[in-house]
Amino acid sequence: MKNVLFASVSLFILIAGPVSADQQQFPAKLAAQAILPANTMVAAPADAPDFLKHSGKFTTPDRKRTEALGTVPGKDGARVTDLKLPFVGQPIQGFSGIKTMADGTFWTLSDNGFGSKANSSDSMLFLHQMRFDWTANKAEVVKNLFLSDPNKIAPFPIVLEGTEKRYLTGADFDIESIQPVADGFWLGDEFGPYLLKVDIEGHLTDVIPTTLDGKPVLSPDNPLIQLPGNPAAKMPVFNLKRSGGFEGLAMSKDGSKLYGLLEGAIYGDNGTMETADGHTAIRIIEF
């Protein structure tokens, strides 16, 4: 595993700064759009536990369970929407990652759930094969692929540990990025952060932890971090902020390497963020 520094502030200046005479401009104009209605739901698989038939049961302000469907107002930030939780079924939410395929379809994935690990234990992790009609402005869901861990690959207890199918949820991983390959999909996760691999059936095959210069990269949501039982004991150490894991995932042209882009900067032992050339920096890590 190698890593390269990527100076985020320099990128911002490059994008936001004035264009000089020797810089080439690339004008962009929106040509079309395809819309997937916000209220797009899909039933949980028939062999899923009843617990997953309704989603969003823990989205109350105090995170206490509610079984009363449609009683919790949905929000886009502070703006109240027309959707109300809990839902019947599983929502196809905003796409965290997308990859075009040779047949004209796209593989994409929904985010991990309802905004946090704490309220997403009934939100299933799944990928979507999509087809877009740019003329009619429509988005068609061709296929949904639900993720599971039947072979107990995850190195920690998952939410549905004792069930037969062991479907994965938004309290297990926070998948954000995707790279399809011949035998499945590579996925970038933010909780570990981990690099994940699933096969064409959606079964988990690999969970690869992230290391940097021989040291683990850990977010506060890493499932292997444990709080001490004694308030006077030293708190566990993590060096990446929450939601700072693999937001982007690229692949080399020959398919031999993956490049994961961390969303947040690494923190040093002194509690300061990593810098490059005097600017806050984020890492692109090569696998």
Image (cartoon, rainbow, N blue to C red):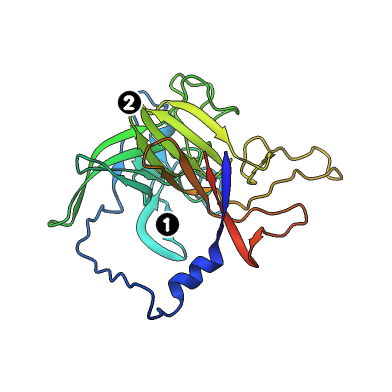
Locate residue 28: give its quadrant: bottom left
Quadrant into which the N terminus falls: top right
Residue at the spot 22% in from the left edge and 56% down from the top edge: 34
- For the residues labelled 1 and 2, the Cα–Cα distance comes to 28 Å
Q: Residue at x 30, y 43 (%)?
A: 41
At 35% from the left edge and 25% from the top edge, which residue is drawn? 201
As displayed, is residue 161 above or below residue 89? above
The residue singled out by tag 1 in the image is 73
- Residue 154 coordinates in the image, percent (x, y): 55, 27
| Residue at which label 2 appears | 46
Residue 70 in percent (x, y) is at 38, 49
Q: Quadrant of residue 118?
A: top right
Indicate which disc residue 52 carries: none
Position of 273 relative to 237 (above/below):
below
Q: Secondary structure at mark 1?
A: strand
Q: Please, is residue 218 above or below residue 10 in the view?
A: above
Q: In the image, is 282 to the left or to the right of 254?
A: right
Q: Is residue 67 left or right of residue 81?
A: right
Q: Amino acid at mark 2?
A: Ala
Mark 2 closeness class: few <14, some 14–19, many ≥20 residues within 10 Å: few
- x and y percent of residue 11 in the render? 49, 66
Label pair 1/2, CB-CB below 8 angstroms: no
Q: Secondary structure at mark 2?
A: loop
Residue at coordinates 66% horizontally, 35% vertically from top-left?
Answer: 224
The amino acid sitting under disc 1 is Pro
The residue lying toward the viewer, choosing from 32 and 166, is 32
Q: Closer to the observer: label 1 or label 2?
A: 2
Location of residue 8 in the rendering, given as x and y in whole percent from the top left corner: 54, 63
